[in-house]
Amino acid sequence: MPTPLSEFDLIAQFFTRPARRADLGVGDDCALLSPPPNTQLAISTDMLVEGRHFFPQVDAAALGHKCLAVNLSDLAAMGATPHSFTLAMGIPDANPVWLSHFSNAMLTLADRFDCELIGGDTTKSPLTTISITVIGTLPTGQALRRDAAQDGDDIWVSGTLGDARLALGMFWQDWQLSVSDFDHVRRKMEWPEPRIALGRALLPLAHAAIDISDGLIGDLGHILKRSGLGATLNVDALPLSEELRQQPRERQIHCALYGGDEYELCFTASPEQREAIFALGRQLHLPLSRIGTLHQGNDLLLENAEGESIVTDGMAFDHFRSNK
Ligand code: ADP
Ligand code: MG
C-alpha cells in the first residue's frame, strides 16, 4: 500500500503552481492580490455537492472542469474578465488518480482563461463537495447587471438551449436517446463552456445579462424582476440543437424553456444593436438568437411565430409567484 497522501502533499502535488499575477499565491495564510487600476472586482461563489449537482460516478475530469466552468460562467454573465479563484473541497479520500484527473481538467480550463488558483481549503468529507470563489475584473461601472434591462430591449440567447436537460432526462430514464445523440448532449451537460469572450464583448452592447443555470424562464425572470419589466418570448425562435430538434415538439420546448445547467448567456439590448450583435456572433462563431422583447408589466408571455399565445405545462410561472 502506498503511504496515504497528507493534506499538505495533496495541495502541493495537485493544486500548487508558481504565483503569476497574484502577489502571493497558494501556501500562506492568505493570498495577496493587487487589482489593476480603474477596475472593479467581480466576485462569485458556486458550490457543487455530490448527489445534488452531479452524480457520484461522474468522471473526475468532467467534474473538475464543470466546477470551475459554472463559476466562470457567472463572471461571463457580468462581462467580467477572469482573474483568479479559490478552491474549497471536501473529499472522502485522497485518491491520487482521481485528484490528478480532477485538478488537470480544472487547471487546463483555468489556464485557457488565465485565471489563477490562489488558495483554498481541503478537508475530508463523506460526500464530495466543491466550492469555488472566482474573482474577475471589470472596467468600473460597466458590469452587465440584472437590474439594467430597458423597456423595448430585445432578448437574446447564445448557443442552443435544452441539451443538458435532454441528457438529464436520459439519466433519469424519462426518455431514450441514440448513443450518438446521448454522447453529444451529455458532453454539453458535463463540459459546459463559459461564455467569457461573449460577456466581455457585450459590455458596450447589452444592458443586462444572466447565465442560464436554472432554466431560461427562471433566469430571465430574475432580469424581469430586478428591472421591473415584463417580456414576450417567441418559442419558435428558441435555438435548438440537431439532437433536440428530433424530439417531440413539447419536449423540445420544455427542455429549452425550463432546462438548467446550460451556461449560455441570456442578455437584453436595444434594437439598435441588432446588427452589431449578429456580427459579434459571427466573429465568435457562436450563434446569437433574438428570442423576444421586453415591455412594461411583470408577466412573461409565450408566443409562437404567428404571435399566438402558447401555454406550457404550468411550471412556467412558479418563479413569478415568488414575486411578492
Ligand atoms: P490554513 O491552516 O491557514 O487554513 P491550510 O493548511 O488549509 O491553511 O492551507 C494551506 C495553504 O494551501 C493555504 O495557502 C491555502 O490557501 C492553500 N490550499 C488549501 N487547499 C487548497 C486547494 N484545494 N487548492 C488550492 N490551495 C489550497
Ligand atoms: Mg484551511
Image (cartoon, helix red, strand yellow):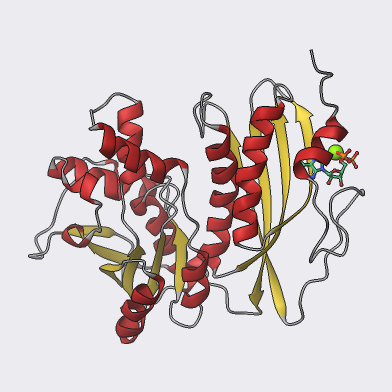
Residue lying at the far front of the rendered structure: 1
Residue lying at the far right of the rendered structure: 28
- Residue 271 visible in rendering: no
Residue lying at the far bottom of the rendered structure: 272
Q: Position of residue 254 (x, y in %)?
A: 24, 43
Report how many numbered discs are placed on residues in the image: 0
Query: Would you identify the image quadrant in which residue 251 lies?
Result: top left
Q: Position of residue 151 (x, y in %)?
A: 34, 77
> Residue visible at 30% across and 36% down?
182
In the image, taking residue 6 as reference, residue 62 lies left or right, namely left
Query: Which residue is at the front of the view, 64 or 224?
Result: 64
> Residue visible at 38% across and 72% down?
268
> Residue visible at 46% across and 71% down?
208
- Rendered position, 160 above or below 123: below
Query: Which residue is at the front of the view, 200 or 63?
Result: 63
> Residue visible at 71% across and 30% down?
90
Quadrant of the snapshot with the N terminus = top right
Q: Position of residue 92 (x, y in %)?
A: 70, 22
- Residue 319 visible in rendering: yes
Q: Position of residue 64 (x, y in %)?
A: 60, 41
- Rendered position, 185 above or below 78: above
Query: Where on the image, by quarter, is ligand 1?
Result: top right
